[in-house]
């Protein structure tokens, strides 16, 4: 996975002809050649509970930093998440927290629940064009997850929070930094994310959008129906049958 985070490499191989690709995908997605995936709770199922571990460590970090109990730390954590897009952004703004220290702490988790996902790997391999990860997490965390899933070879690059100067999704500046970093066009792209609000700026830029619904209330925060083209329940299953999603209304 050498240079995956810092350098984009073009993925050209696909076993589908252009005609078959067009037939496989709904009209909103059929002419797109860039695929942008969120990481946590998107490339792996939320049921693996990895983000629950991260969530707990965020609470521990805030409790230790501010000298408050875990209940109050959780209130602060979720308030910052709702207002700033990430807990980290609020901690940086209000408390001058070093982002690398924070992410090293909260991503120090057990990832053994993540197993190689052959269905996901095959679905990614069959996608036409280039595939990227766009995460509010760290590159180190992304590399661990992609390696566990055994899909790093299917991806052209990873855009982590440091690449945007620690400006997170859903801030529009993060999306502009993403497309500039890889030299892609929003109109050629599809973005898949479990957080509905992260799809609003993507849609406004001209990306097609796919919302992966996990049933988590935070995933529904800030959703705008006109910014969502499709809704899916399982990424691997949907990649195997892209017409299996539903339109959002």
Image (cartoon, helix red, strand yellow):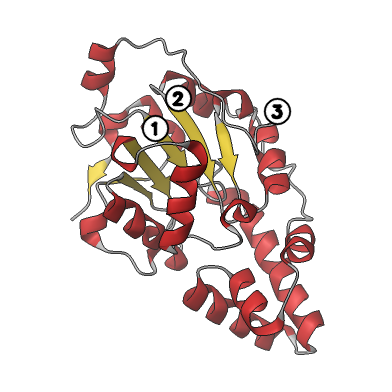
Q: Residue at x 21, y 37 (%)?
A: 28
SS for dot 2? helix
What residue does disc 3 label?
1
Q: How far apart are labels 1 and 2 at the CA level?
A: 14 Å
**Label 3 CA crowd tier, 10 Å (few <14, some 14–19, many 20+):** few
Q: How far apart are labels 2 and 3 at the CA level?
A: 19 Å
- Tell which circle, 1 or 2, labels the residue nearer the N-terminal end: 1
Q: Position of residue 185 (x, y in %)?
A: 35, 38
SS for dot 1? strand
**Image height check: is 118 above or below 6?**
above
What residue does disc 2 label?
123
Q: Position of residue 83 (x, y in %)?
A: 48, 78
**Image height check: is 66 above or below 103?**
below
**Label 2 CA crowd tier, 10 Å (few <14, some 14–19, many 20+):** some
Horizontal placement of 40 versus 14: left or right?
Answer: right
Horizontal placement of 204 versus 127: left or right?
Answer: left
Which one is nearer the viewer's eye here, 173 or 21? Answer: 173
Query: Which label sits on residue 34?
Result: 1
In the rendered image, the quadrant that contains the C terminus is: bottom left
Q: Position of residue 163 (x, y in %)?
A: 60, 51
Horizontal placement of 212 versus 141: left or right?
Answer: left
In the rendered image, the quadrant that contains the N terminus is: top right
Q: Position of residue 12 (x, y in %)?
A: 46, 15
SS for dot 3? loop
**Label 1 CA crowd tier, 10 Å (few <14, some 14–19, many 20+):** many
Q: Are marks 1 and 3 in contact (CB under 8 Å)?
A: no
Q: How many numbered discs sit on the rendered protein?
A: 3
- Tell which circle, 1 or 3, labels the residue nearer the N-terminal end: 3
Horizontal placement of 136 versus 19: left or right?
Answer: right
Q: How far apart are labels 1 and 3 at the CA level?
A: 20 Å
């Amino acid at each position: 996975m050498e240079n995956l985070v810092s350098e984009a490499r073009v993925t050209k191989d696909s076993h589908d002809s252009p005609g078959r690709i067009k037939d496989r995908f709904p009209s909103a997605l059929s002419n797109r050649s860039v695929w942008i995936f969120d990481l946590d709770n998107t490339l792996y199922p939320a049921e693996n509970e990895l983000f629950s571990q991260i969530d707990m460590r965020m609470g521990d970090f805030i409790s230790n930093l501010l000298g408050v109990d875990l209940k109050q730390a959780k209130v602060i954590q979720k308030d910052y998440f709702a207002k700033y897009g990430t807990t980290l952004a609020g901690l940086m703004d209000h408390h001058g927290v070093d982002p690398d220290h924070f992410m090293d702490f909260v991503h120090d988790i057990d990832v053994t629940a993540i197993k190689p996902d052959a269905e996901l790997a095959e679905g990614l391999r069959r996608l036409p064009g280039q595939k990227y990860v766009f995460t509010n997490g760290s590159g180190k965390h992304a590399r661990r997850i992609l390696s566990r899933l055994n899909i790093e070879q299917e991806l052209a690059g990873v855009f982590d929070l440091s690449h945007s100067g620690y400006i997170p999704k859903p801030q529009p500046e993060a999306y502009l930094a993403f497309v500039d970093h890889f030299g892609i066009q929003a109109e050629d792209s599809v973005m898949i994310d479990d957080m509905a609000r992260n799809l609003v700026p993507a849609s406004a830029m001209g990306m097609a959008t796919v919302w992966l619904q996990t049933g988590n209330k935070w995933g529904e925060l800030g959703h705008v129906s006109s910014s969502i083209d499709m809704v899916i329940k399982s990424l691997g299953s949907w990649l195997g049958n892209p017409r299996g999603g539903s339109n959002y209304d």
